[in-house]
Image: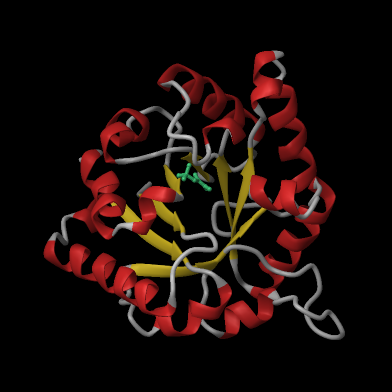
C-alpha cells in the first residue's frame, strides 16, 4: 500500500500563493519521480481556490476539499455539497477535523452523515479522529477514539472510499508530535477496529521532514495529514522523501 501524503492548507494563502504552492509541489515531484513509487499526494486548498489550483495539477497530485455539506443541494446558504466538489474534480474530502469539531460543534453522527453523502457523490473521505490533551492525561484516548470511529464512520466503509486520520488534538499546530510509541499503540488500536484491513490510517499532528522518517515507518501508519508543513512545497515533499 502506498503512503498517502495529504496537505491540509486550512484557511491559508492568497490565490497567488496557493497557485505557486501547487506548482511547487507538482514541479518537486517532476524533479524526483521516484517519490511516486511509494507515495500518493493530495492537496486540500480552501474552497475558493479549488478550481484554479486544480488547473495547476497533474495526475500525480489529487485535489481535495476540507469539508462538505450534509445535504446535496437546495436552500443551504454558504454550504458546498459533495456533488459540487466531485463536479470540479475533487477526489477527496476531509471530514471531522478537530478544528471543525471545535469551531463548528460538529459531532460524530453529523460527520457520518456527511461522509455518507460524500461517498454517494463518489468522493473518498478522510475522517479525522483524535483525543484532546486532557483525555490523554486521563488515559481515555482509546475510549474516545473508539467512540469517534464507531459513530463518525458511515456504513459501507472500505479502503476504496475511506481513509482514517489519527490526529491527537494537542499535537495539531503545536510543534509537539505524539511519540512513536503512542502513535504505534493508537494506530494498532484503530487498525483493530476497522473491518477492511486495507483502509489507510494517516497520522497528523506537527509532522515535518525532521520527524517524518520516525513516524512513517511505524506499523499501521500509511501516510500523513499535514497542516503547517504542507504550506511549503519543500517541506511537504521533504516528508515523503524522509521516509525513503
Ligand atoms: C492538521 O491540521 O491536520 C495538522 C496535522 O496540522 P499540523 O501539521 O500543522 O499540526
Q: Position of residue 20 (x, y in %)?
A: 30, 74
Q: Residue at the location (27% across, 47% down)?
A: 240
Residue that sits furthest to the left in the current view:
31
| Quadrant of image for the C terminus | top left
- The reply, left or right, for residue 71 in relation to residue 83 is right
Q: Nearer the viewer, residue 156 or 97?
A: 97
Dividing the picture into quadrants, the one containing residue 7 is bottom left
Q: Residue at image x 84%, y 50%?
A: 109
What colour scheme was applied to this rendering of the protein? secondary structure
Q: In the visual, does 209 lie left or right of 100?
A: left
x, y percent for residue 105: 80, 50
Q: Which quadrant of the view contains residue 73?
A: bottom right
Q: Tell me how many marks there are.
A: 0
Q: Position of residue 58 (x, y in %)?
A: 30, 77
Name the side, left or right, on which 109 lies relative to 134. right
Identify which residue is drawn at 84% across, 86% down: 74
- Judged from this view, the residue extending furthest toward the top is 138
The residue nearer to you, when weighing 175 against 200, is: 175
Q: Left of 159 or right of it: where is 71? A: right
Foreground residue among 203 and 192: 203
Up the image or down, 131 lies above or below 185; here it is: below
User: Where 66 sits versus 157, above or below?
Assistant: below
73, 131: nearer the viewer? 131
Q: Residue at x 64, y 35 (%)?
A: 130
Residue 27 at what x, y percent from top left? 20, 70
Using the rendered view, name the quadrant where residue 208 is placed. Answer: top left
Question: Where 97 falls versus 64 (above or below)?
Answer: above
Q: Is residue 34 above or below residue 61?
A: above
Amino acid at each position: 500500500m502506498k503512503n498517502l501524503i495529504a496537505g491540509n492548507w486550512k484557511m491559508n494563502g492568497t490565490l497567488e500563493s496557493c497557485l505557486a504552492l501547487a506548482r511547487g509541489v507538482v514541479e518537486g515531484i517532476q524533479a524526483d519521480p521516484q517519490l511516486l513509487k511509494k507515495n500518493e499526494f493530495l492537496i486540500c486548498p480552501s474552497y475558493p481556490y479549488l478550481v484554479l489550483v486544480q488547473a495547476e495539477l497533474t495526475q500525480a497530485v489529487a485535489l481535495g476539499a476540507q469539508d462538505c455539506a450534509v445535504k446535496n443541494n437546495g436552500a443551504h446558504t454558504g454550504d458546498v455539497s459533495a456533488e459540487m466538489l466531485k463536479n470540479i474534480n475533487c477526489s477527496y474530502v476531509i471530514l471531522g477535523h478537530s478544528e471543525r469539531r471545535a469551531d463548528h460543534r460538529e459531532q460524530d453522527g453529523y460527520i457520518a452523515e456527511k461522509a455518507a453523502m460524500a461517498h454517494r457523490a463518489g468522493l473518498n473521505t478522510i475522517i479525522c479522529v483524535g483525543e484532546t490533551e486532557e483525555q490523554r492525561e486521563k488515559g481515555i484516548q482509546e475510549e474516545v477514539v473508539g467512540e469517534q470511529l464507531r459513530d463518525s464512520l458511515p456504513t459501507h466503509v472500505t479502503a476504496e472510499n475511506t481513509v482514517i486520520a489519527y490526529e491527537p488534538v494537542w499535537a495539531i499546530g503545536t510543534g509537539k508530535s505524539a511519540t512513536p510509541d503512542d502513535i504505534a499503540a493508537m494506530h494498532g488500536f484503530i487498525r483493530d477496529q476497522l473491518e477492511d484491513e486495507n483502509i489507510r490510517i494517516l497520522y497528523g499532528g506537527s509532522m515535518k521532514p525532521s520527524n517524518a522518517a520516525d513516524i512513517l515507518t511505524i506499523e499501521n501508519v500509511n501516510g500523513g495529514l499535514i497542516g503547517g508543513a504542507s504550506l511549503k512545497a519543500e517541506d511537504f515533499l521533504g516528508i515523503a522523501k524522509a521516509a525513503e
